[in-house]
Structure formats: structure tokens, C-alpha cells
Amino acid sequence: MAKYIFITGGVISSLGKGIATASIAKILESAGFRVSLIKFDPYLNVDPGTMNPYQHGEVYVTHDGAETDLDLGHYERFTNARLGRINNVTTGQIYSTVLARERKGDYLGKTIQVIPHITNEIKDRIKAVAKETKAEIILMEVGGTVGDIESLPFLEAARQFGLEEGRANALYIHLTLVPYIRAADEIKTKPTQHSVGTLREIGIQPDILLCRTEKPLNDEVKSKISLFCNVPQNAVIEALDVSSIYEIPLIFKNQGLDKIILKHFGLKARHSDLNHWQEKVVDKVLYPKHKTTIAVVGKYIELQDAYKSIYEALRHGGIANDCLVEIKKIDSETIELEGPQKMLSGVSGVLVPGGFGYRGIEGKIKAIQYARENNLPFFGICLGMQCAAIEFARNCLKIKRANSTEFVKHTKEPVISLLEEQRKIKQMGATMRLGEYPCRLLKGTLAYQAYGKADIYERHRHRYEFNNRYRGALVKKGMVFSGIYPKKNLVEILELKGHPWFVGVQFHPEFQSKPNKAHPLFAEFIKASMLFAARRGP
């Protein structure tokens, strides 16, 4: 029988519930247990695919093509769990399913209500994950903050689930804030007391408290929290601010969190070793031997979560090279106004990530031109790859009107355009080229050198493709199409002859990068940036 852990959050949002959930999964996996994870999102959207990054942050794509919450990225980076569309559940999905059944007549004669119909559907989703993944421990993160009306059905389902499965098979963890009032030089426990009180009113008594704090909690503070929140003192766990998120599993393990959880479930650790994580990840992050600076030129730069997986994959590339990666975040619209020279001088590599719409595109194109002309290592991802093709066509083939039909619908030079099947699509949600597709690599190229094999699989999220009409002309001028989707002869990777490292990919390699196993393209990009920095000198 699987064991179930529900993780809730209180007081305020953005406490790091997703990273805490991933870290708990990591220490349980290191104890020898198969884990799977679910993110419950309380919004009414079916998925985040149609949401603006300013509203939601990054959309993370799973191998089976689901557009999901960015927390699934944390889950896959920290663990070996392979997640899919069943691992992200939204209120929109739940209500859509229940209403579809009602229209079919599955509930004939009954009044459809939140309890039991909506809560039963939520519980069925949990059981489906247990059945499909065969996981021994399933961790469920309930989005939002306790007290929000939107998350109440998920919390009620969590309460019922513990009752039905038995308390020995279900465990509740609550992440809360223990603020430090600097003027008074005091740590305050009252917000935590109120948050737990609200959770208990719903019918859930937390077994463990994770206390997010910038100051260590002494025994007196822990004792007070324990008394007023009805939680054993040893189950009041510090979640201290850290310099790297990859330290968190070690912090939790050092406080015996894994032992508390396994004791509750009546389980014994088969092994429990995070030494590899300490040596190969954390030590490399905290004590790197080298340093490089990478410019990320995007259009959602001011929002930290918009390029979450990109930033983490760059750091993974740094870990693989024993190198600190300083990320210089540059708004592409600023480059349009001030030019690339001012913004990019001093960096050792340029990465242009994905995105949608014309705003900021000309700045991205100028940044790519600067990288190409100055032999600066360049990595283009999705829209970044498309911009690289447009820039090359404009400035090397002198096709001045080269563009994408995404930006200029009836452009006369559609270097990037919609596939025929995409032109027929009316619905926006979940209709892009999504999920894992094969790619065949050309030997003797940078891509082949990075992967070390000819056949790879990568995750996609886009509508527009490179127009093969222009392939021959670009090849004559020195572009190399080093990766192809064989079934439809679509360009997946482009490179430049004579440039030390210039690679654009149509897919999203950042979704398969891990701190202990950097994606090969990110590892090679960082290595190229280090060589560039060494050639340039101090």
C-alpha cells in the first residue's frame, strides 16, 4: 500500500513550498523508496498553457506533452521521478471532468455538489497516480495558502483521504512563516499559530511543521510552537534561508525529517546516503573553482519565475564544470534602445530563451548578431533559435524582410512559419507541438559532440517552425542544420561554421537538466563560455 504526504502552506505565498516538497521527496528517495509527486493548483484554468508568464511564471512541459506548473520542474530536478499530465491537477480539470460526466448522465437523479463529487474526483486522481506509478510514497503539494477559498476542495479531499486510508498511511506537513522582527529583535510565532489554527478548523491536524525563517529557532521558540500547534517539538523543523536551494535536502535530513516521516508510516530506511548530493552538487555550488558570466536576453526578465528552468539549467552547467555561473538578466527591449555593445560587453556567453509575441524581438535579434560577429558563445532556445535563423537570413543572406509569420502574418520572407496543421487550429489550449519528440543528430557537429550519440529525445512547446524553403540558402552561407526531426524533416538544431560555439535548438533542453546530471548542451555552453573568458583574459 502506498503512503501519502500532503504538504500545505500558510501565512503568505512564495515560501518555497514546491522546493520543500521536492527536497522531502529527495531525502525519501535517498532512503530507498520510489516516490511520485502531485501538484494541486486551485485555479480554474485547465492548465497554465494559456496564461501570461507575468500571471503564472514558467510553464513546465512534461515528456507526455502536458503544460504544467513550474513546481513539477523542481520535482523532476531533485528526484528520479518521471512525471506527466497526471501529476498536475487543477480545479479546472476537476470541474471539467465532473461536469462532462454529469452531461453524459453518469449522475442521473443526483444533485452534483462539491462534497462528495468534486472531492471524490480529487481523491480518484491521487489513486490513479498511485496505480500508474507504483510509487511507494506519494507527495502532494496543495497550491495556494491555507485560508484561500479556492483551495478548500483540495484540503477537504486531503482530510477525507487521511480518514479513509488511515492515519498510519497519510501524513500532513504544513509550511509556515516564523518572521523575525528586526526592530524588536524577536522571532514571532503568532502567524504560525493562526495558520495552524485555520488548518485545524478545516479538519487537518499537521504532523510536521516546516518553519521558514531567516534566524535559527532555539528550543524555547520550538517548544512554544509545539505547545500551541499541537505538534511534537522534534517535528518542528527549521527551513532556514540558504544560499542555494540544493542545500535544503541536507538541512531537512540533518534535522531527522526523513526519520520522523518513516516512523509515522512504520517504514525503515533501506539506505540513507546523501553524500553524493553533498559532494557532486552542494559543494560544487558553494565552492566553485571557476567563474563565468552569462547574459540571458529575454522579454520577461523582471519576473524571476518566467525562466526558472533556464536559470537552474545554467547553474547545472556550472556544477558540471566546477564553475560559478553569474547570470546577467537583460531585457531585450533595453537592447533595442541602447544597443548590444553596452549591455553585452563583459559577458562570456549569451542565451536567448523562448517566448511569444513581437515585443522585444528586435532586441533579441541584435543580441544574436552581436554574439555571432564577436565569436561570443551563443545558445538560442525555441524562439531564440528562430530569432537566430531570422538574424542570419537578414544579415548574411541580405534578406532584409526575413521574419516570422508570428510577428508579421503576411511577411513575404517567412523564414519561420506555421505548419499546415497548425493553421487549422482554432483552440489555443494544449494545441502546440508539445512533449517529447525524437531528433537525429549530424556527426561532427557541436550537438553530436555534446550528446555523444545520434538519436536523442527532447521536449517541445511551440507552434512555429523553421521554413525548409530557406534551408539550402542558409547552408550555402555557413549555417549547419545539425538536428532534424526525421518524421517530418523539421529543423531542430542549427549551428554556424567557423564560430566557436553557436547553437540554436527548437526544443527546451532545460526541462531535462538536473543538478547532478546537467543537460549536455548547457554543460558544453558553459564550457565554451569559460574558454571565451580565458581567451579574453581579465
Image (cartoon, rainbow, N blue to C red):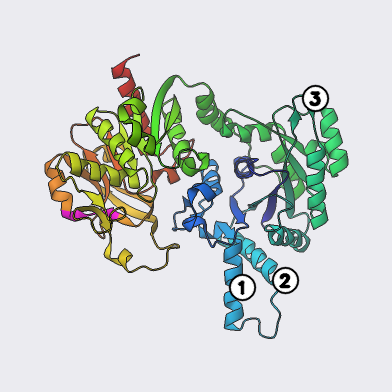
Q: Is residue 82 left or right of residue 267?
A: left
As drawn, the residue found furthest toward the right would be 227
Give the residue number, with chain letter if any, for mark 1.
98
Query: Residue at the spot x=43%, y=29% of the render?
Result: 328
Numbered disc 2: secondary structure? helix
Query: Which kind of residue does numbered mark 1 sit on?
Result: Val
Residue range in magenta is 465-469
- What quarter of the picture does the N terminus occupy? bottom right
Numbered disc 3: secondary structure? loop
Depicted 410 relative to depicted 229: above or below: below
How far is mark 3 from mark 2, CA to CA? 48 Å
Q: Position of residue 476 (x, y in %)?
A: 11, 43
Which class describes the residues within 10 Å of circle 2: few (<14), some (14-19), or many (20+)?
A: few
Camera-side mark, 3 or 2: 3
Camera-side mark, 3 or 1: 3
Residue 384 can be seen in this image: yes
Say whether disc 3 or disc 2 marks the residue closer to the N-terminus: 2
Query: Which kind of residue does numbered mark 3 sit on?
Result: Ala
Q: Identify the disc placed on residue 184.
A: 3
- Magenta segment: does it hold 243? no
Say whether disc 2 or disc 1 marks the residue closer to the N-terminus: 1
How far is mark 2 from mark 1, CA to CA? 11 Å
- Between 94 and 450, the residue placed more toward the observer is 94
- Between 256 and 494, the residue placed more toward the observer is 494
Give the residue number, with chain letter if any, for mark 2.
116
Q: Are marks 2 and 1 in contact (CB under 8 Å)?
A: no
